[in-house]
Image (tube, helix red, strand yellow):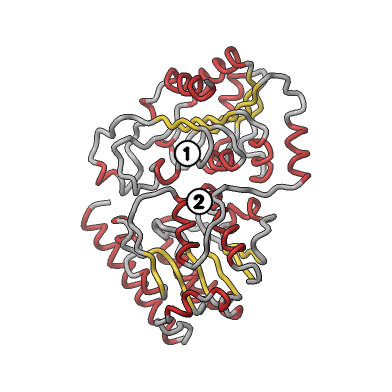
Amino acid sequence: MKRNSITDYSYLIYLQTKAAYILGRILNIIQPIGITQKENDDKNNIRKVLVLKTDEIGDFVLATPFLRELRLMLPNARITLVLSPTTYNLVELCPYVNEIIVYRQSVPRKLRPFILSWRAFKLGYCTLRQKHFDIALMPRWDTDGYYSAYIAYSSGAKRRVGYAENVNSRKQIMNKGFDLMFTEVLHDKMPKHEVERYLDFIRYLGGKPSSDALELWIDSIDDKYADQILNNISTKMLVAFCPGAGAVDRQWPPDRFIELGHWLKKNYDSSIIIVGGFNDKTLGKNIGDALKEETINLTGSTTLRQTVALLKRCHLYVGNDTGSMHIAAAMGVPIIEISCFPVDGPNWHWNSPLRFGPWKVPHKILRTKNSGTNTSVACYGNASNTIFEISVEQVQNAIQELFS
C-alpha cells in the first residue's frame, strides 16, 4: 500500500470511528470515562464479563491461558465469549465460559470497513447491550481488522479495556481512532510472545496468573475418531505434516515435504498424517499420493477437535506457522516450524516467531538470515518470500538435533 493510500485509508478509518463514537453518544450507550482506581482494582464489582476473541485459530489457542486465568480470577462471574465461526468447534467444550456468541466475518477484505463496522456495532447494540456487562475485554494486541472494538463500545459495558492503537506502527494506521471505543487502554509496546501479552492483560485487571500452559478441550467421540483413523498404523513414529498456510508465501514447497517424508520413513520408521483446512485439500492430496504407504491425508476432512485428538497422538509436527502448529504445541508435541519470516524482520510483525513461535514445547524454528528487502515496507504486507530458501537438509538436521 503506497504512502498516500495508507494516509487516506487511515483518515477514512478515523472518520468512520469518530462517527461510530458520536452515534454511541446519541444512542446514550457509552458510559462516562473516569473510573476511580478503587473501582478499577475491585474484582468483586465484576459480575458480567464480555470477552472479544474474534481472530484466527492460532490466536485463540494462544489465548487459552487467558481464559483459564480469567475464570480463576472471577470464579462467580458470567463470562460471554464472542468469537469467529472458524474457532467455534474448538471452543465448544471450553469450561471457562458461560456463553458463546458467533460473530460472522465472511466479508471481502476491501469491504470490511463498510460492512463489518456496521455488523459489529449492530451486534453490540442489538444483542449484547441488553446483557448489561460490567466489563468488556479485547486482549488482542495487534491490528483489529474485525472491528471488535466497535462491539465492545456498542455493548454499553461500563468498562471497556483493550490495547492502545499506538502499540505498533501498523495498528496506529489501520486502527486510527479506535482508542475512543475503550474506557481504558494498555500502552505496552514491548515485543513479546502473545501468551505473555494475554497474561499481562490478566495482571492489569488485578489477577495473578498461576500457569502459562496452553490447553484445549475434546471429548471421547473425538478420541474415538482419532483411534479409528490411526488403527492400522504400525510404525514406531507418527509425524504430522501441515503444508498449508494462510498465504502462499508462508508455504514451504510441497516437493520438499515429499522428500522429507521419504527420509522420515526410511530413517525413523515413521508414518505421516497430513492435516490442514479445506483450502489445503489439493496440496495434501498431492503430497499423500507421492508418499503412498503409511500416509494418511486428512486435509479438509476433520473438525478442529478431531485435529486436536490426532495431533495429541503424534511424536513430531513439521509445518508452517499455522493454527495447527499451535494446536500441536498445546498437546505437547515437539515442533519443527518452517518460517517465512527472516531473522532480521521486526519483532512486532504478525509473522514474527518471537510473538507466535511454538509455546513451551521442544522445537526448532528454521528461518533465513536476512530478508534482502526493506522490512519496514515489506511488513505492511506479507513478509518477504524467503521460505523457499530453507532446504530439506536443514529440516533434516533440525529433526536430528531435536531428537538427539
Q: Is residue 95 left or right of residue 169?
A: right
Question: Does residue 37 sit above or below 70 in this rendering?
Answer: below
| Three-letter residue code for mark 2 | Asp
Q: Is residue 297 left or right of residue 345?
A: right
Q: Residue at x 67, y 33 (%)?
A: 313
Q: Residue at x 64, y 45 (%)?
A: 304
**Residue 130 in picture, x, y percent from top left:** 60, 80
The span from disc 2 to disc 1 (Cα, nearest Å) is: 11 Å
Label whose residue precedes the other's in the sequence (2 or 1)? 2
Say which residue label 1 marks. Answer: 321
Tag count: 2
Q: Residue at x 50, y 42 (%)?
A: 359
Nearer-the-camera pick, 333 or 243:
333
Secondary structure under tag 2 reads helix
Numbered badge on residue 266: none
Question: Does residue 131 sit above or below 211 in this rendering?
Answer: below
Question: For mark 2, does the 10 Å Cα neighbourhood hold few (<14), some (14 to 19), or many (20 or more) residues?
Answer: some
Q: Residue at x 46, y 79 (%)?
A: 38
Say which residue label 2 marks. Answer: 59
| Three-letter residue code for mark 1 | Asp
Nearer-the-camera pick, 134 or 85:
134
Secondary structure under tag 1 reads loop
Nearer-the-camera pick, 97 or 20:
97
